[in-house]
Image: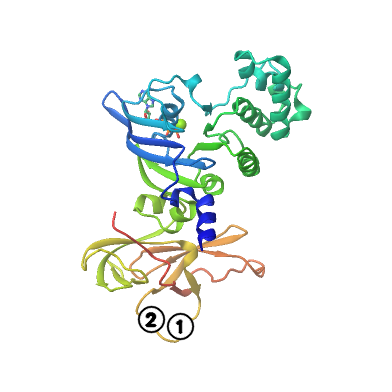
Amino acid sequence: MQNGTDKLFVDQPWLDPEAEPFVKIQSLTKTFGSFTAVSSVDLEIYEGELFSLLGGSGCGKSTLLRMLAGFDPPTSGNIFIDGVDMAGVPPYQRPVNMMFQSYALFPHMTVEQNVAYGLKQDRVPKDKIAERVDQMLSIVELSQFAKRKPHQLSGGQRQRVALARALVKNPKVLLLDEPLGALDKRLREQTQFELMNIQERLGITFIVVTHDQEEAMTLSSRIAVMDQGRFSQIGTPTDIYEYPETRFVANFIGSANMFEGRVKENGADYVIVQGVGSDVSFYIDHSTAVRENTAVWVALRPEKITVSASAPEDSADYNFVEGVVDDIGYLGNFSIYKIRLDNGRIIEITHPNQTRPKHGRHLVEWEDKVYLSWAPHSPVLLTK
Ligand SMILES: Nc1ncnc2c1ncn2[C@@H]1O[C@H](COP(=O)(O)OP(=O)(O)OP(=O)(O)O)[C@@H](O)[C@H]1O
Ligand SMILES: [Mg+2]
């Protein structure tokens, strides 16, 4: 048991009450005039994490990163890195390096000169520089391109040069602002895995800013979802997706059918929620502190709903609704079905195309009458 717990804490140090965070942010605020870009945030990041800041444009991600790097002084609050208060510490004396949103390489320099630049500035001896640059280029798999100029490289290769340049001085924390933003979708997915491998091999703490939720889900040990300068939720990708704590998070990460409702019955280990303005009622298999008759929301992910063309043998009181197929989207690996209820409400369902359908056929067809059901564990009860 002890070993099991130890292993759990190694993989998930944030669960260990005795672990010391490597980066600690306390009530950090940044205002520009009367506008608050980052609003009293607290955050603890552990050594070796690949931590993502995820949020829409303008929510304060870059501002937070710039304060960590030391480019912008906070309006109030504290940042500690490796136990040291960063107040007044200039960027070049912090154990961090930053890869910017647009990772401008020096166009007139070769790949190896670009990577060597920071070490040269620090007057590191020549042979040491050569050794270190070789090592970095090998890690990002660009050794054979050492003599090329940036314009002779692909987007993904340029991105890896920028990564090597940011890593060469061996920072304890690497801050990456939209590191894959310039890449097309396919290259982006491939590079995500490369980035994860490099991070794992070097064991450096990465803090990555992204507005791409799939990217954050793929890369991260944990994610902070940001909205208007605050954190809506901090958790592992599974926490954030399966156990969202707010409507904002449920809607921002993936998609969710959101139902307004009232708590009808609050049992010891279940809750019954009656949908408002629809016949849908939910039996949810966990308890809540919410009182009966309180207005709540229920989020239900599209892939957690089963669609069937035949009526169930017993009519169910809960977690069941009838409708008509309003629209079908075939995406190859899965299909989206939009089901219209009697009251006009649309429920979205996704279904994996595990077996090859007959030509032009779907699981169910337009205007078919269908029956939807889901498990008591699937709906998420939300109060804010
Ligand atoms: N120097 C500045 N002066 C005034 N307002 C600023 C300044 N820098 C940023 N802001 C504002 O602060 C907010 C947060 O900006 P920030 O650059 O942190 O957003 P972001 O989350 O990185 O967005 P994006 O995904 O578009 O890069 C924005 O509304 C922006 O206009
Ligand atoms: Mg930004």
Residue 310 in the image: state x and y as whole percent. 49, 81
Q: Residue at x 42, y 64 (%)?
A: 347
**Quadrant housing residue 244:** bottom left
CA separation in Å, label 1 and label 2:
8 Å
Q: Which residue is mark 1?
A: 312
Where, by quadrant of the figure, is residue 191 drawn? top right
Q: Nearer the viewer, residue 187 or 244?
A: 244
Q: Residue at x 47, y 66 (%)?
A: 304
| Residue at 63% across, 18% down | 119
Does 38 sit left or right of 367 as displayed? left
Q: How is the image coloured?
A: rainbow
Between 8 and 211, the residue placed more toward the observer is 8
Q: Could you tell me the amino acid type at mark 2?
A: Ala
> Can residue 349 be seen by looking at this rendering?
no
Where 55 falls versus 360 (above or below)? Answer: above
Which x, y percent locates residue 360?
A: 63, 66
Decide which of 110, 299 is in the foreground and name it.
Answer: 110
Quarter of the image with the C terminus is bottom left
Q: Is mark 1 within 8 Å of ligand 1?
A: no
Q: Is residue 245 above or below residue 300?
A: above
Dot 2 corresponds to which residue?
316
Q: Is residue 106 left or right of residue 289?
A: right
Q: Secondary structure at mark 2?
A: loop
Comparing 278 with 191, the one in front is 191
Label pair 1/2, CB-CB below 8 angstroms? yes
